[in-house]
Image (spheres, rainbow, N blue to C red):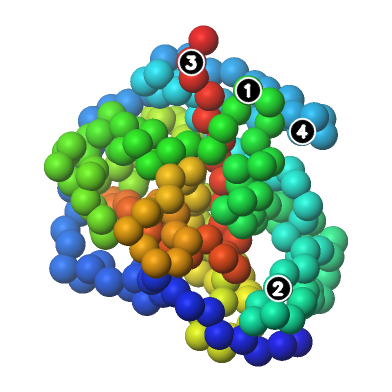
């Protein structure tokens, strides 16, 4: 496999480690439950649950559709390359359990009919509904609150954000999956126009801390989790 370098507007693995020791958790979470729930079946026949929080329906499961991440090829520094995994059946089982990983463009293109990739504003509205202050919601970096409620499964919000990590390359390292069980990394549809290279805002949740990170991340050679939303009907 080729070794390659990537121009980053931020190095996610480094950003993930910032501020955790300096930030304190917020213990004053509100009680938030969906106003209604339901199921949706995509074109592949996969059934997803959804919960209505505010004016949006949020998919509960991370999206599993699209081309399996490990079958994809990519171009880095002018060379085409691809992934290599030891056990494809095991990877398929993980996708069925915790969702597929998508590039930013794929995350936008793979949305089922009637659904869309949530914007940065959608996430800020969700965070405020879950108790984060409006001033914190608009900041970059780690913000206190909302993380615990975003990860609630089967009770409370039922949003079930997962700590599935991401797949990406840092410096000269070959792309690989990392931070599984420690962080959950989710694309938004909103780009950061202030960066020289293409970046989009992401959300990162972290194990055992009630915080959410809002940060611009390069859209090139990054594969992350996706939850889709739709306007409540």
Judge depth for marks 4 and 2 and give the one in front: 2
Mark found first going from the N terminus, 4 or 2: 4
Q: Is residue 116 above or below residue 136?
A: above
Evaluate whether residue 180 shows in this view: no
- Callout 3–callout 1 Cβ contact below 8 Å: no
Which residue is label 3 attached to?
Answer: 232
Mark toward the start of the polypeptide (1 vs 4): 4
SS state under label 4: loop
**Closer to the camera: disc 3 or disc 2?**
2
User: In the figure, 32 relative to 103: above or below?
Assistant: above
Circles 3 and 2 in contact, beta carbons < 8 Å = no
Q: Which mark is residue 46?
A: 4
Residue, x 74% and y 29% (percent of image)?
42
Mark 1 and mark 2 lie on one chain; the one further toward the N terminus is 2
- Compare marks 3 and 2 and give the one earlier in the sequence: 2
Give the secondary structure at mark 2. strand
Q: Which residue is mark 1?
A: 114
Task: Write down the residue under mark 2.
Answer: 75
Residue 46 placement, left or right of 48:
right
> Which of the 4 image quarters holds residue 128?
top left
Left or right? Give the position of 192 relative to 93. Answer: left
In this rendering, the answer to whether 57 lies above or below 182 is above
Q: Which circle marks residue 162 in the picture?
A: none
Query: In screen coordinates, is 84 left or right of 198?
Result: right
Report, in whole angstroms, how far the alpha carbon at label 1 lies from the one at label 4.
Answer: 15 Å
Q: Nearer the viewer, residue 202 or 218?
A: 218
* SS for callout 3: loop
Q: Nearer the viewer, residue 37 or 194?
A: 194
Indicate the position of residue 82 as horizontal and vertical percent values: 77, 74
């Amino acid at each position: 496999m080729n070794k390659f370098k990537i121009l980053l507007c931020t190095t996610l693995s480094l950003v993930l480690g910032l501020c955790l020791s300096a930030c304190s958790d917020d213990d004053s979470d509100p009680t938030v439950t969906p106003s209604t729930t339901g199921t949706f079946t995509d074109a592949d026949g996969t059934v997803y649950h959804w919960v209505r929080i505010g004016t949006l329906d949020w998919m509960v499961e991370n999206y599993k559709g699209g081309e399996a991440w490990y079958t994809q090829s990519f171009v880095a520094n002018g060379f085409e390359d691809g992934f290599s995994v030891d056990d494809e059946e095991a990877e398929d089982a993980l996708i069925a359990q915790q969702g597929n990983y998508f590039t930013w463009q794929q995350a936008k293109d793979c949305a089922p009919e009637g659904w869309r990739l949530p914007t940065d504003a959608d996430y800020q509205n969700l965070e405020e509904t879950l108790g984060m202050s409006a001033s914190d919601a608009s900041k970059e970096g780690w913000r206190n609150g909302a993380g615990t409620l975003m990860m609630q499964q089967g009770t409370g919000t039922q949003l079930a954000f997962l700590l599935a990590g991401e797949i990406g390359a840092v410096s000269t390292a070959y792309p690989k999956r990392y931070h599984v069980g420690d962080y959950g990394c989710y694309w938004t549809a909103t780009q950061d126009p202030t960066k020289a290279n293409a970046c989009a805002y992401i959300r990162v949740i972290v194990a055992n801390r009630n915080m959410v990170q809002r940060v611009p991340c390069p859209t090139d050679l990054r594969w992350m989790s996706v939850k889709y939303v739709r306007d409540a009907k």
